[in-house]
Amino acid sequence: MECTVNWTGALGTRSGMGFVAETGSGHTLVMDGAPDAAKPENGGQNLAPRPMETLLAGAGGCTAYDVVLILKRGRHDVRGCTVKLDAERADVDPKVFTKINMHFTVTGKGVPTAAVERAIAMSHEKYCSASVMLGKTAEITTSFEVLES
């Protein structure tokens, strides 16, 4: 796996904290820093997600992928899956994630709660490399609800 990240600056200038990542699969991802009122040249313009937001979103995508795939392989009629992530970070650098809660909302027809609970556990214990990696610094908790559709 590879990725190249290029500093774009702010609107073509060489100030600001805008970045474009090009992934090994040929996709691009734009990131930006938070604005800095005290030193605008050191801050972003709030034009894209922060890198840490992108990391959190990647963990959500990784685990949602697992949960949907596990449920589909179990021949469950899953029709939707949403994961809402709430995270806390350390107050001092490197400001790693210290707590992450992932709340899953799975919709489907007759999907058993036990199957969803099992799929989430399997994702976090075995398959989701992002969750396992973030779990080295953060306490990760999960919750879920199953909605009939």
Image (cartoon, helix red, strand yellow):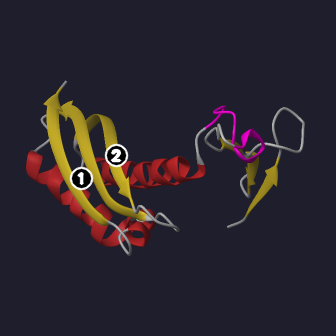
Q: Quadrant of the C terminus?
A: top left
Q: Residue furthest right?
A: 13
Q: Amino acid at mark 2?
A: Leu
Q: Residues within 10 Å of mark 2 (few under 14, many from 20)?
A: some
Q: Residue furthest top?
A: 149
Mark 1 vs mark 2, CA separation in Å: 25 Å
Q: Per the image, is 41 magenta?
A: yes
Where is 101 relative to 90, above or below? above
Q: Per the image, is 143 magenta?
A: no
Q: Quadrant of residue 24?
A: bottom right
Identified at 63% across, 33% down, the residue is 46
Identified at 47% across, 63% down, the residue is 95
Q: Which mark is residue 85?
A: 2
Closest to the observer: 103 or 76? 103
Q: Which portion, as a residue range, is magenta?
A: 39-48
Residue 25 shows up from this direction:
yes
Q: Please tell me whether the stretch drawn in magenta is mainly helix, strand or loop.
A: loop
**Residue 118 image position (x, y, % from top left):** 17, 59
**Residue 73 image position (x, y, % from top left):** 30, 53
Residue receiving disc 1: 74
Horizontal relation, residue 31 to residue 20: left or right: left
Closest to the observer: 82 or 44? 44
Q: Residue furthest bottom?
A: 136
Which of discs 1 and 2 lies nearer the camera? The answer is: 2
Where is 47 relative to 131, above or below? above
Q: Secondary structure at mark 1?
A: loop
Q: Residues within 10 Å of mark 1 (few under 14, many from 20)?
A: few
**Residue 146 image position (x, y, % from top left):** 15, 37
Closest to the observer: 116 or 38? 38
Q: Amino acid at mark 1?
A: Gly
